Structure formats: C-alpha cells, structure tokens
Image (spheres, rainbow, N blue to C red):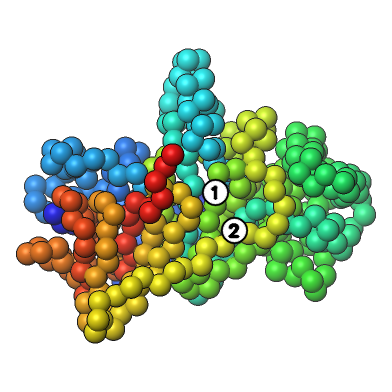
Amino acid sequence: MLIPISNTPRDYSWGSTDLIARLQGREPTGSPEAEIWYGDHPGDPSDVVGAGGGTLDAALSAAGEPRLPFLLKLLAAGSSLSIQAHPTRAQAREGFAREEAAGIPRDAADRLYRDDNHKPEVIVALSDEFRALVGIRDLAATRRLIAALGDGPALTRLDALLAGDDPERAVRGALEWALTEATPADVDELTGDLARATDAEFAPEIEALRTAASDFPGDRGLFVALLMNLVVLHRGEALFAPAGVLHAYQSGLGVELMAASDNVLRGGLTPKHVDVPELLRVLDPTVGPAPLVAPRAVSSRAGETGAAAEFAPPVPDFALTRVELAGDPVAVQLRGAAIVLATAGEVSVEDGDERVALAPGDAVYVGGGVREVVLAGAGEAFVAQPGALVEA
C-alpha cells in the first residue's frame, strides 16, 4: 500500500527563508520555513495527496494500520533552535503522569511532558554544511576557551565551577549557575568578550557564540552554549541526540528522524519556558565529543548500481536509510511501515503493482505489510522505518 503525502512548512522564527524552497525548486515565500513533517503525529499529520485527501492519521486508522513510532522531517535552520534535551521513556511516563494529575493543560506554555514517550533523534545533513551544538565539550578545552575570552567576574566564576575533580558534578553546577544565578551584567560581559575575542583555536566556536549572542540578546543560555561541542556536518553525515543530551541545531538543511514525541526540556536561547530543575533531572552530563552516527552499507541485489546506507542509532523506534540512485533500481528491505522522502532528482517508489513518482520534498507512506520497497530513478531518497532493535 502506497499513500502519497505532503505537508505545509512550519513557520517557526528560526527557520530558513530559502533552504526548503530551493530543495523543492520553487521561489521562496519570504517567510521562515523551518520544518515539514511527514507522518501521523497529531501535532501536524501529513496530508494525503489524491485518493480522497484527508490526513495520514485518519487514512491509517481507516485502513487498520498501526500508528507510526517515528516522525520524519525536513529541517531548515536559519538561526539557532533552543538548547534542549529530551527525557528517557521512563522519565517521560513519570513526568506525563505527574502533569496530568496536576491538571496542567497539554497546550500550556509551561507544560513539559505532552506525551509519555521519549524523543531520541538523528539528523543527516543535506546542505554542504550543517552546524549544531551537541553534548558537553571536554572541560579542559572549555577552560582554555574561557581563558581566551577574558578574566571578568562571570567567566572567572564559570571557570571555578568547572575546575572540580568530578566532571559531571562540575557540569551540573555550571549549568545551574548559568540558568539561575547569572545576571544580565554577566551575559553582557560574555557578549563583549566574544565581540573582542581573536583566539585561533576556537575561532569557529567564538563565531557561533557571537551569532547566538546577536540572535538572543541577554539570554542566559549563552553560557550553556559556551559549554557545548560545535559540530559541523557535511552532506551525508549524521549526528544522534539520545535522551538527556543537550543540543541546538544552528544552521543548515537536514533530514531529521525522531521518536513520535513532543517532549522538550529547554536550556536557553529561547523566549519559551525553561524549567531548570527538570532539565537538570533529565540531563546526561557526560563530557566528551558529540555523538556522531556512521552509516552502514545496506546490501543490494546483484546488478544494482545505486548505493544504500543505513543510519541506525541504538533505539527501536527508527532507522534511516539514505539511497543514492544512478538509474537502476535499489531494493530496501523493510521491518515495518515506512516513509520514503525524495531529496534530489527524480525518484519513483514501487510496491508490487503500485508506483509513485516523487520530486524533491515529496514523500510516500509504505504500509500494508510490505517487506520490500523498490526505488528507481536518478537522485536521492531517504527511507524511514522502525529500528532493528527489539525493546525489552
């Protein structure tokens, strides 16, 4: 069963004004276009193209198909998203039950747990560069960056908090100070230090922090961003944000796949609600490099000239296969219902007697117990489906 789907770009303020339009080969609207959602998530289910229209969630319910465990997106960042972390499934269940019992409306601005699911996510770069802040940088490196910026009261205090023998305790202490005690004068101090800084070792990090300071003036999250790894992905590279890991995408176009959830704990660079105690409760304070994901080659049939590679983080909810097509068909084995999204060229998707042609930005749901989908054409597509892991 093939169901062509589409959706309207979401106009979040951080969205790019041209990246999605360029991928789809149309003129930009002039407004931010941040994300296109592909799936049955109740927050913005995809529209069914043809066959009576409606939304994908309604179509799947009518056909007796189960809900998707994932949500696929095109994401186009023109400026930084909020710094955020997501809970584990156990934390989400506890938090959701707590807020339900308290009677907090699910659409309330200060609601933290809108469902009882976790929200790990993977993103694969489509633009030549995709920039993100992900995870907590090695503390010795961060202290070198602080030394390069200056020795004013705020940075001296932050450096002292990071100097302890227990890195995870130091991270928690630094984050708590940054989000509860840092003053507007402290943020101004850091902003001024960034404007004057010329350190060669951390030039990309300083530039990213300058941009954040300009986009979010006076925001305490600037100190949080100072602690995080700057990652620059090139086209086809990916990173994974598991539960508890701080992250904030900065700029670029990517394909994002996540568990079907809307649970976000924010940590700055945002006008939205920041609950510091709850953020620190779900936080993974592990120090180290950003969690990148290397693809593994997916076996093809004899004679196929395309290439397929799967990004498979250690979660059961999803895996993402990138397929590069060079004219001959490529078969992708499926573990359950899937969504195929075209991102370049001309791609067709075949399921037995059904065939759907896709242009960049078009997608199709593949269901009905199908265990193999065949892609053909010349271009690029991504196949989102359940992961290979079985949840305990």
Say which amino acid is labelled 2: Pro
Which badge, 2 or 1, is on the more N-terminal residue?
A: 1
- On-image quarter of the N terminus: bottom left
- In the displayed structure, does residue 352 sit left or right of residue 77? left
**Horizontal and vertical percent position of residue 278:** 63, 31
Visible residue check, residue 4: yes
Mark 2 lies on residue: 291
Numbered tag placed on residue 330 in the rendering: none
| Residue at (30% x, 44% y) in the render | 68
In the figure, 386 relative to 183: above or below? below
Residue 70: give x, y in percent of width and height: 36, 47
Q: Name the spot of residue 376 as percent of width and height, x first.
A: 21, 75
- Disc 2 packing (10 Å; few <14; some 14–19; many ≥20): some
In this rendering, does residue 15 appear at all? Answer: no
Q: Is residue 162 left or right of residue 213?
A: right
Q: Quadrant of residue 180?
A: top right
Lateral position of residue 341 relative to residue 138, left or right:
left
Q: Residue at x 83, y 44 (%)?
A: 166
Amino acid type, mark 1: Pro
Q: Element under label 1?
A: loop
What residue is pinned by disc 1?
242
Residues at discs 2 and 1 in contact (Cβ within 8 Å) = yes
Q: Is residue 374 above or below residue 313?
A: below
Disc 2/disc 1 C-alpha distance (Å): 8 Å
